[in-house]
Amino acid sequence: MDTRIQYSILGALSDDYEDFETTFAEAGASALTYGFSLSRQEMHEALAELTKSGLVQAYLLSPYPPHAQEVDFDLNRIHELWFYVTPEGKRFVENMDQHP
């Protein structure tokens, strides 16, 4: 995966749990600053890969305990899922910030 895509997505997810649409909008805006665009298909593939690699975790959120339940990435449920960067993902972004 293109590291610019990784960086754009991880940056969008680094502050809070985000749903797909918010992540897509924020990562897409970030991608434009790097001189490329991000399609929905690329976003789906990137989120699948980032969750598989342990840099991002997928969640189901609820107003009832447990409020955030870790789940596997499932493209069929993409609009029900929320995403957040893992500690490993945060280290990845920090490392990229230090070595652009």
Image (cartoon, rainbow, N blue to C red):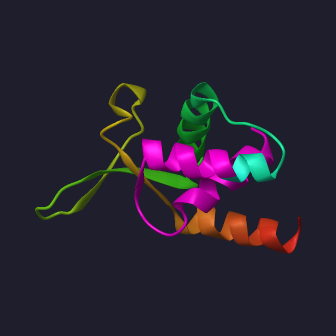
The percent coordinates of residue 99 (x first, y second) are 88, 69
The percent coordinates of residue 4 (x first, y second) are 78, 48
Specify the farthest residue to the left.
64
In the foreground, 21 or 98: 21
Left or right? Give the position of 93 relative to 90.
right
- Residue sitting at x 58%, y 55%: 55
In the foreground, 56 or 16: 16
Instruction: Examine the residues drawn in magenta and state their main secondary structure.
Output: helix
- Residue sitting at x 18%, y 56%: 62
Magenta-colored span: 1-29
Residue 77 falls inside the magenta stretch:
no
In the foreground, 19 or 54: 19
Q: Is residue 27 above or below residue 11?
A: above
Q: Is residue 72 above or below residue 93?
A: above
The percent coordinates of residue 64 (x first, y second) are 10, 62
Q: Quadrant of the N terminus?
A: top right
- Residue sitting at x 14%, y 61%: 63
In the foreground, 91 or 9: 9
- Residue sitting at x 73%, y 47%: 31
Specify the farthest residue to the right.
100
The percent coordinates of residue 23 (x first, y second) are 51, 49
Left or right? Give the position of 96 relative to 7.
right
Q: Is residue 12 above or below residue 3?
A: below
